[in-house]
Amino acid sequence: MSTNSTNLGFRGALRRFGKAAALGLVLFGGSAVLFYSDGFQKMFAAVGADVDLPEVAGIEVAQANREAMHAARAAWLEDINAPAPSIPIGPDGYFAPPSEDEIPDGPFGESIRRGRDIFVNTPKYAPQYSGNSQSCVNCHLDAGRKENSAPLWGAYTKYPMYRGKNKMVNTYQERIKGCFTYSMNAQASPAGGPPPLGDQVYLDLEAYAFWLASGAPTGQVLPGAGYPKVPETELGYDYNRGEKVYAQNCAICHGDDGQGRREADGSVRFPPLWGPEAYNWGAGMARINTAASFIKYNMPLSQGQTLSDQDAWDVAAYINSFERPKDPRQTGSLEEARQTFHKNEQSYYGKEVRGKIIGHGVSREQAL
Amino acid sequence: MKHNEHNDITKVDHNFEPYEPYRPIPLLVIAVVCALGVWGVLTYIGDLTAAEQFVARTAPVAEAPATPAVELAEGLNNASPEILALVHEGRDHVWSCASCHGDAGEGNATTPRLAGQVSDYLFKQLVDFRDGIRDNAHMAYVARGLGEDEMRELADYYAQIRLPSLVGPRLDGNLERGRQLAHEGDWKRNVPACLQCHGASGEGVQPSFPVLAGQQPEYTFAQLALWHADARGNSPQQLMDKIVQAMTPEDMRAVSDYLSTLPLNREPAPQVQ
């Protein structure tokens, strides 16, 4: 072998190397040009392959659609023949509420801001009426904006509405009063109960909801309003099965003991799900079907719709199988209250769990 | 041999070659090697200049606090002599932590700040490096030389150091967009506010959510880029993976820069022991 190649002679080898180097340069240059001219990407795309990670459209689409609505509104006022504004929607197809920086200036804007503050940090901004460690935003995500977590824009335009809970037509204020009474456990608050109708707290919360609903039609249930129902499963629900689901998917944030997590300064980071700092036995979330709906679409945070229906039911049963503050409507015995207020509902109120009847309630004092 | 000249095999001319002379390496291969060589040299030069530019850009921030970090820090001696030796001198298989992470655990560029980080989080990272669940050659090498007790003590040591934020935006990110992502999120992309998990002021939540305030913005960005590329796999329940995969590179730069503007207001170091 070596004898053969020596036949080339030193100059021959050099010439060969020169040729190779030139060819190498041409190769390199050609490839570089192809690369920088997006040639590869185009070739790739030509055979139908995905070149880049798909870009996820986000809030900017929603904002652009809102601006288009504002422009259409102005044009329509000018000229009745201009096309009427359409409902602004986000890239996901759901209603697009305005963003924070669109809150107007002046007294109305101030009321909206106060409403938003109460909504996202109730114990701080409505301390006299909050009887646990919950804030409205804990169950109505993204400051009341997120679809499928009973968003304010989906609720505001539905009221006044008939409600089975108290068998009459409810105003928006009365609806919020319900969340103070049960979800915020107002019975344990300094005021001892929810704000009276007409209170400034309601006016501000209402201003905030009205503003969020700007552009949403009334008299129509919007997609994404309320909590979508989760179909019942063959196995039904079982808190024993739910325990494992909880440990794997929820405990990192809500704690092994369900007491949530707090920051160094004591403020709630992840809300408690049972015990004296949670929603009370009268709350919608204490019903297993409602909790399953909320969880299926919103939990684990940022991973909605990843749990199976079965897991959502089981874990909802699990978190609602512990004591929490009593139902404020209970005046007589637990059994009476169960017959009157909790008949036919999917909950453990007044039923036996782990060998004990639950529903008596637990208060902050008892917990100490 | 001479007398058989006419039809003897000995007549064969040994210098005659019916085919092209055998060449051990085909021309094309040499050409490809040349091309790769050119590429390599250019990349090397490119990296060199990029690194120089990078250093030039970050030098004022990265260099200035070299002494102050130690002077500003509290709790630098709150550990056993063995742990302090690991931190400052290292041991055969364990390079000293301070040689990379700084004398006060303040970090530098893509080497993270450890000072004041959540203890359980630090411990988990060391275990994950050791087990290869979090992929980084340097840290894997270091962590394999540590016992679990030492990991725990090192984590506790760094967690209790109190050191104000020494960083600021250095990535040209859009700070307003960063603020929005950090405080409000972009739920249309299913991205919650970062601070919803990492604490209202970015100071972490025990035991699983790390501090982001005061962290080197280059490091924050690098970690987000790893998740974006599916290359950091140790986030519990894939919480970070899914969030970052919905973000654009501009978003990642914006939020890394914004987070570096957050102050660290924590209580002064508790008196340990």
Image (cartoon, rainbow, N blue to C red):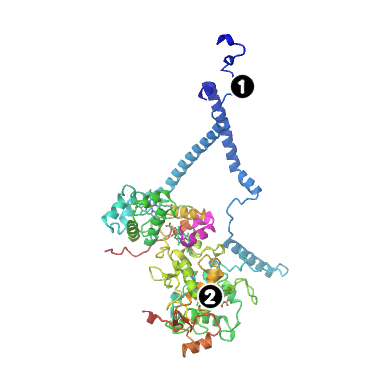
Q: Is residue A49 visible?
A: yes
Magenta span: B234-254
Which mark is in front, 1 or 2?
Answer: 1
Report the Cα–Cα distance between label 1 and label 2. Answer: 86 Å
Q: Position of residue B200 (x, y in %)?
A: 44, 66
Which residue type carries mark 2? Tyr
Taking the spot 55% from the left edge, 33% from the top edge, the residue there is B29
Q: Specify whether B90 is left or right of A243.
A: left
Is B245 covered by the magenta stretch?
Answer: yes
Q: Position of residue A99 (x, y in %)?
A: 55, 67
Q: Are marks 1 and 2 in contact (CB under 8 Å)?
A: no
Taking the spot 58% from the left edge, 58% from the top edge, the residue there is A56
Which residue type carries mark 1? Pro
Mark 1 element type: loop
In this orientation, which residue lies closer to the viewer: B144 or B195? B144
Mark 2 element type: loop
* Residue density around tag 1, few if under 14, some if 14–19, many if 20 or more, within 10 Å: few
Q: Is residue A116 visible?
A: no
**A57 over A285 or under it: above or below:** above
Figure label count:
2
Query: Which residue is the site of mark 2?
Result: A237
Query: Which residue is the site of mark 1?
Result: B18
Which quarter shows the C terminus of chain A? Answer: bottom left
Query: Same subunit under labels 1 and 2?
Result: no
